[in-house]
Amino acid sequence: MADLVCIGEMVIDFLPGESTGVYIRNAGGAPANVAIAAVRNGITSGVYTKVGDDDFGVFLQDTLKKEGVEVLNPERAKNAMTTLAFVTLDEHGDRSFTFGRKPGADMFLNKSEVSADVIAKAQMVHAGSFSLSAPDSADATREAMRLAHEDGKLVSFDINYRNVAWNDDKEKCADEVKKLLPLVDLLKVSDEEVDMLGGEENIPNVMKENDITVVVMTLGGDGSKCFFNGINFVDRGYSEPQYVKDTTGAGDAFWGGFLSRLLILGVRSKNDVTEEIARDALDYGNISGFLCVQEKGAISSLPTRETIEAFRKNHK
C-alpha cells in the first residue's frame, strides 16, 4: 500500500508546446505531480481521484502507471472532465492563463468512494484545495483527511487558489479552506495565497489555533519560509524568479520533495518533526523545485532522489 496517498481532482493541463514560451506538463494536477515526485524519491505513492475514460483520462492513467503511481479507487468517471490551460508569456516572462472545460463533466471524488482501509495503510495523506470546488469532492476530501487525522497519520494540505474553481470568490475559497485546517499537520501556501490565512503575520496564530506543526510559504521563486512551532526561519531557495515564472509544476516538485524527505527521515507523525528535520526537508524541497524549473516543469523533469542528493553534495 502507498506510503503517501494524494487526494484531489486531476486537472489535465494540455499546454501546446509549439507556441513560444509555452511548455507541456504531460499529466496534470498537483496530486499527480506530488505523487510522481515522491515515487522518484523512492516513496510508494497513490492518487485518490476520479480519472476519466476519455482520451485524456486514458493518457493520464497510462502516465501514472508508467511513473509507478497507483490510482487507488477503481471506478473511472464516465463523464470525464478535461481542463485545458492555455498559457502564454509576456515580455517579462509572466504567465497568463486561459481555462476551458469540457461541458457536463464530473470528475470529482465522492465521499462514498473514500476507503478507510486505504487511508489506514498510508503513512501520509496529502490533499489540495482545488478538490473543494465541488460539494461532493469537498466532502470526500474532508472525510479522507478526517480519517487520516483521527488515525494519527501525517496530513498535508496545499492551499491552491484557482479562479476557475471558485468563480473568483476568494471569501468562499478561504471559508472552505479554514474548515479543514484543524485536520492539517503540514500546510503549504504561496505568498499570493497567504491572505486566506489572514496574512503572513497571522500564520503563528493559525498554527496555534489549529495545532499545525509546519507551515511552508513559497515565495514565487525567491525561496521559501518555514514556520515551525509558530516561529519562522528563512532559508534561501535555489530558484531564480525569472525561471519560476515561465514554468509549471515546480511547486509540486517542491512539495513532493519536501514530503518525501520527511518520510525518508522516518517521520510518521507530527510529533516526529523537529526544527532540524523541517530545515532539512525544506532544503530538499527547494532543490527539487529548482531542478524541475531547469527543465521547464514537465513531468519528465521531476527530479529523482539521486539527482537531488548529488546537487546537495556538489553545492555545500
Image (cartoon, grey):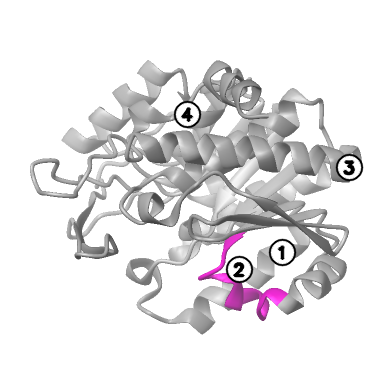
The disc placed on residue 274 is 3
In reply to whether residue 198 is colored magenta, the answer given is yes
Q: CA distance from mark 2 to mark 3?
A: 26 Å
> What residue would you read off at disc 1?
181
Tag nearer the camera, 4 or 1: 4
**Can you give x and y, in whole percent of width and height, for residue 18 in the image?**
8, 42
> CB atoms at circles 4 and 1 under 8 Å apart?
no
> What residue would you read off at disc 4?
36
First in sequence: mark 1 or mark 3? 1
First in sequence: mark 2 or mark 4? 4
Asked which secondary structure carries label 1, the reply is helix
Q: What is the magenta range?
A: 189-200
Tag nearer the camera, 2 or 4: 4
> CB atoms at circles 4 and 3 under 8 Å apart?
no
> CB atoms at circles 2 and 3 under 8 Å apart?
no
Q: Does 133 sit left or right of 198 as displayed?
A: left
Quarter location, residue 180: bottom right
Q: CA distance from mark 2 to mark 4?
A: 25 Å
Q: Nearer the viewer, residue 84 or 20?
A: 20
* Placement of 61 over or under 281, stated as above or below: above
The disc placed on residue 177 is 2
First in sequence: mark 4 or mark 1? 4
Quadrant including the C terminus: top right
How many labels, in total? 4
Q: CA distance from mark 1 to mark 3?
A: 20 Å
Residue type at tag 4: Ile
